[in-house]
Image (cartoon, rainbow, N blue to C red):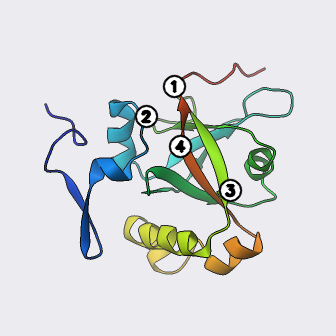
Amino acid sequence: MVGKIAYASCIAVCGWMTVALAQLLPQGLPMEVAEKLVEAKQIYVATLRKDGSQSEAAPVWFGIMEGAVWFTTSPDSHKGKRIRRGSPVFLSVEGKKGPFIRMRAEIVRDGAKAEALGQLYERKYWIAWLGFFRPSRDRVESGKTLLIRLVPEESSPPPASN
């Protein structure tokens, strides 16, 4: 069976332009993870605590754009604080227990990116279409919401929890 990503004519329609789906996905993801990511409604993310142990993975809404995985979080959340401190993010498409891919996280304060992610959410999550829980330009630009961009760092298991 040919994988959804590997299939040569697989394209996604983005406004007036068509873009090869493979160009939208982060480079360096294993094929099986990329295929699951395309179909997933949520991802599970974990970060590193100050003591080096892995946090429990939390489910988050996400979007794929510009070769990265994007999501938002509160700057006061544990994951938000840890990402601001430089923690990598461990991403799983299969659940809280993994397997995980180690991702490099970048905080982005670009309101236009927040709006683009909001449009992806509207197509993916019905409640976002109603205006709930979608990223806001104003909140991202003011720092009230963190817009997180993830790209693969390496494929490795997260550190063992205590």
**Circles 4 and 3 in contact, beta carbons < 8 Å:** no
The quadrant in which the N terminus is found is top left
Q: Which residue is mark 1?
A: 155
Q: Position of residue 86 (x, y in %)?
A: 76, 42
Residue 147 image position (x, y, % from top left): 64, 61
Amino acid type of the residue that numbered disc 1 sits on in the rendered structure:
Ser
Front in this rendered view, residue 160 or 14: 14
The residue that appears at 62% across and 60% down in the rendered structure is 72
Quick check: 52 left or right of 47? right
Report crowding for label 4: few under 14, some 14 to 19, many 20 or more residues within 10 A (C-alpha): many
Residues under labels 3 and 1: Cα distance? Answer: 21 Å
Distance between mark 1 and mark 2 Cα atoms: 9 Å
Report, in whole angstroms, how far the alpha carbon at label 3 lies from the one at label 2. Answer: 20 Å
Q: Amino acid at mark 3?
A: Ile
Any part of residue 134 in sight: no
Using the rendered view, name the quadrant where residue 111 is placed.
bottom right
Give the residue displayed 34% in from the left and 31% down from the top: 32
Query: Element type at marker 3?
Result: strand
Which residue is identified by label 2? 28
Tell me if label 1 and label 2 are in contact, CB under 8 Å.
Answer: yes
Mark in the foreground, 1 or 2: 2
Who comes first in sequence, dot 4 or dot 3?
3
Marker disc for residue 151: 4
